[in-house]
Amino acid sequence: MYAVIEMGGKQYRVEPEQILYVEKTGFEKGSEIDIKNILLLEKDNKVSFGKPILENVSIKAKILDDVRAPKIVGFKYKSKKNYRRRWGHRQNLQKIQITAITA
């Protein structure tokens, strides 16, 4: 059994007991959450599609930790003009574990 969910503007394929990193949700570390934006569900080799989301299906997840992604470094310059800009960014993420898919 697996499902496709939407969190933080991105889509993820999830299975029970899977650990994944998603955009920061605003929930506290250690809390249980219900995910309602389920786009697709596969159960017993039958696939159900949502229009746009599935009703009567929920996914339970537990927030394990708050982490930060690796640093992305950007650099831009203009030749012969002595113009150089270097910048960096680290995205805030949350490590979550899918505990159950109920349909």
Image (spheres, rainbow, N blue to C red):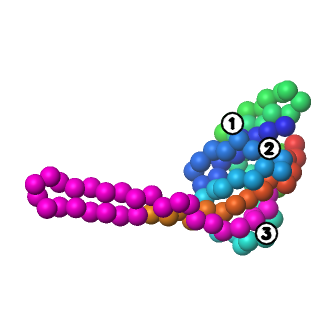
Query: Is residue 76 at least partly visible in the picture?
Result: yes
The residue that mark 2 highlights is 15
- Discs 3/1, front: 3
Q: Residue 32: x, y in percent?
A: 81, 65
Query: Is residue 59 at least partly visible in the picture?
Result: no
Q: What residue sits 88% from the left and 47% below the top?
A: 102
User: Does residue 42 sit above or below 6 in this rendering?
Assistant: above
| Residue 51 disc label | 1
Farthest bottom residue in view: 28
Task: Write down the quadrant of residue 31 in the picture.
Answer: bottom right
| Residue 31 disc label | 3
* Mark 2 Cα-neighbour bin, 10 Å: few <14, some 14–19, many ≥20: some
What residue range appears in magenta? 61-88
Q: CA distance from mark 2 to mark 1?
A: 21 Å
Q: Residue 76: x, y in percent?
A: 27, 55
- Discs 3/2, front: 2
- Discs 2/1, front: 2
Looking at the picture, tell me which residue is in the foreground, 72 or 39: 72
Most prominent secondary structure in the magenta stretch? strand
Instruction: Determine contact: label 3, label 2, CB under 8 Å.
Output: no
Residue flagged by tag 3: what amino acid is it? Ser
For mark 3, give the secondary structure. loop
Q: CA distance from mark 3 to mark 1?
A: 29 Å
Q: What residue sits 71% from the left and 41% below the top?
A: 13
Q: Residue 53: x, y in percent?
A: 70, 42
Looking at the picture, tell me which residue is in the foreground, 25 or 69: 69
Q: Earlier in the sequence, mark 3 or mark 2?
A: 2
Residue flagged by tag 1: what amino acid is it? Lys
